[in-house]
Image (cartoon, rainbow, N blue to C red):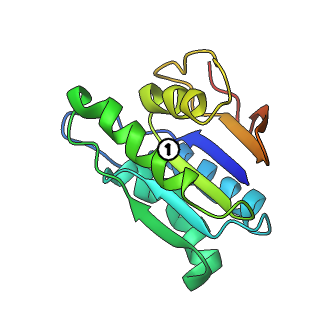
C-alpha cells in the first residue's frame, strides 16, 4: 500500500474563513498534476472547506475513479478519535490500494506515526509544502519518504 499524506494547502486567515488563498489553490492544482497518475483510488479528508478545496482538483481529474471519504474532526478534543478512524479505515483496505490523506498540521504527524511511519517533525502553522509518502509492505515493512512540493513555506 502507498499512502500520500499532507496538510491542506494555504488557508485564509480571517475570522470565520475556511477556504484556500490563491497560493493554496495553486498548490492544490500542482498536487493534482503530481498525483493524477499515481493510482490513488481512495482519499480521506476532514469536513473543512480547506481540505475539500485541496483535494478538489484531483477529484476533477480522476472523477469517479477517486472515492472520497470525509472523516469528521468536530473539535481538537476529538482529534485522537479522528486519527484512529482514518488509520483504522486505511488499515482495512487491501494492500494494493493507493491512498491520499489530506488533513491538518496537528493530525498528519499522528496519522503517520499510527501507520508505522515513526516520528516526523511538527508541521508549523505556516508550513504547507510537506508531502509524506508511506509505503506499507507485507508483512510488516514500512518506508517513509519526506518530500516538499510547490513554493517553499517557512
Is any part of residue 150 visible from this angle? no
Q: Tell me residue 66's x, y (percent).
A: 58, 74
Q: Which residue is mark 1?
A: 87
Q: Is residue 55 above or below residue 136?
A: below
Front residue (pair 17, 2): 2
| Residue at 41% across, 37% down | 83
**Quadrant occupied by the N terminus:** bottom right
Residue furthest bottom as drawn: 64
Q: Tell me residue 98's x, y (percent).
A: 70, 61
Quarter-of-image position of residue 63:
bottom right
Q: In the drawing, does residue 42 fall left or right of residue 146? A: left
Front residue (pair 86, 21): 86
**Quadrant occupied by the C terminus:** top right
Q: Tell me residue 54's x, y (percent).
A: 51, 54
Q: Residues within 10 Å of mark 1 (few under 14, many from 20)?
A: some
| Residue at 58% across, 27% down | 113
Q: In the drawing, does residue 144 fall left or right of residue 52? A: right
Front residue (pair 114, 138): 138
Is any part of residue 144 visible from this angle? yes
Amino acid at each position: 500500500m502507498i499512502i500520500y499524506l499532507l496538510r491542506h494547502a494555504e488557508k485564509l486567515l480571517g475570522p470565520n474563513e475556511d477556504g484556500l488563498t490563491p497560493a493554496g489553490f495553486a498548490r492544490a492544482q500542482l498536487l493534482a498534476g503530481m498525483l493524477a497518475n499515481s493510482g490513488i483510488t481512495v482519499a480521506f479528508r476532514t469536513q473543512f472547506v480547506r481540505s475539500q478545496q485541496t483535494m478538489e482538483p484531483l477529484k476533477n481529474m480522476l472523477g469517479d475513479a477517486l472515492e472520497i471519504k470525509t472523516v469528521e474532526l468536530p473539535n481538537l478534543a476529538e482529534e485522537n478519535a479522528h486519527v484512529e478512524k482514518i488509520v483504522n479505515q486505511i488499515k482495512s483496505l487491501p494492500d494494493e490500494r493507493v491512498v491520499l490523506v489530506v488533513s491538518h498540521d496537528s493530525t498528519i504527524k499522528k496519522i503517520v506515526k499510527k501507520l508505522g511511519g515513526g516520528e516526523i517533525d511538527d508541521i508549523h502553522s505556516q508550513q504547507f509544502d510537506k508531502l509524506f509518502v508511506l509505503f506499507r509492505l507485507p508483512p510488516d515493512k514500512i518506508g517513509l519518504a519526506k518530500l516538499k512540493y510547490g513554493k517553499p513555506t517557512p
